[in-house]
Image (spheres, grey):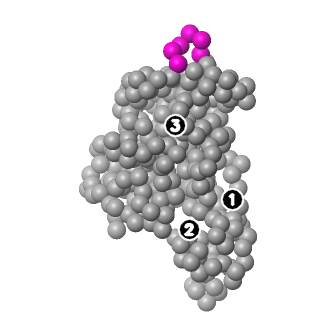
Amino acid sequence: MAKARLGIIGGSGHYDLDGLTGVQEVNVNTPFGPPSDAITVGTLNGVPLAFLPRHGKGHRIDSAEIPAKANIYALKSLGVERIVSVSAVGSLQEEMRPLDAVIPDQIIDRTRGRSSSYFGNGIVAHIAFGDPYCPELRGLVVQAAKKHQPRTHNKGTLIVMEGPAFSTRAESELYRSWGAHIIGMTALPEAKLAREAEICYTTLAFVTDYDCWHESEESVTVELVIANLRKNVETSRRILRDLVSLLPAGRGCTCGSALQNAIITAPDRIPADARKKLDLIVGKYLKSPSEVK
């Protein structure tokens, strides 16, 4: 099966990635069902990467229906160590204008009913999530983004809402009072699952609107979002082309060992089916002494 170092998850309006060579489409089967779509694997500026449209080509999958477990697992199975999630967001602060790029450093979870962990069913683990984004990958994305979008914000708090409806004015004002900066529907459970899978993860967000709180700007509509999405897609492609040339060969963060002390369940108490299902993610921590070389 094709292998990749970097995974790109394309958000609304971003359903393909141009400039790839040696392209092939890969259909990955996972214990959690199929991912959102076939994964495009190829090489960009000499770096092997995998591209997955989060909502499927043609945008046919609602935010709450995205098979996030399958998506992250599928990318992990292809060898992906880093994921950049490209997302459209609304702004909750005046200084973050439509078409600005934002690379957030914090998340607030306002989703409901989304399965946000690979664990359970006989195996318990608690990952550290105080800093939900990989600091090393965030820094590289900021560096690449500033080259193509001078109005790049290098931090901010992202509210992840359930959707599919946009916010009420009361909700929008509440999130502003919390000090949140942008709002979207898809970074969770992706970020949590990527951490559990020991994959570096960051969001490259592009503002499409001022949500519904801004008195002098029109409230968010699908038409407004789509118009600004089209303007943002080419910018994101240019940023990603530069990003791949910045990636170091190895990782200097702790994402690759996020599970090292997180699994609480005694290995001999983990059911065989749970062990088998999560072997790709936890196998290296559950080997018996005789299996470790």
Residue at 38%, 47% (x, y): give it.
56
- The circle on residue 164 is 3
Report the magenta stretch's main SS.
loop
Query: For the magenta stretch, what is the residue range?
Result: 214-219
**Along the horizontal axis of the image, is 52 left or right of 260?**
left
Along the polypeptide, which appears first: circle 1 or circle 3? 1
> Disc 2 marks which amino acid?
Ile
Label 3 Cα neighbours within 10 Å, binned few <14 / some 14-19 / many ≥20: few
Label 2 Cα neighbours within 10 Å, binned few <14 / some 14-19 / many ≥20: some
What is the x, y in percent for residue 58?
A: 33, 41
Most foreground residue, 256 or 273: 273
Give the secondary structure at mark 3. Answer: loop
C-alpha distance separating marks 1 and 3: 28 Å
Instruction: State the residue position of label 1.
Output: 127
Residue at 59%, 81% (x, y): give it.
272
What is the x, y in percent for residue 181?
A: 63, 29
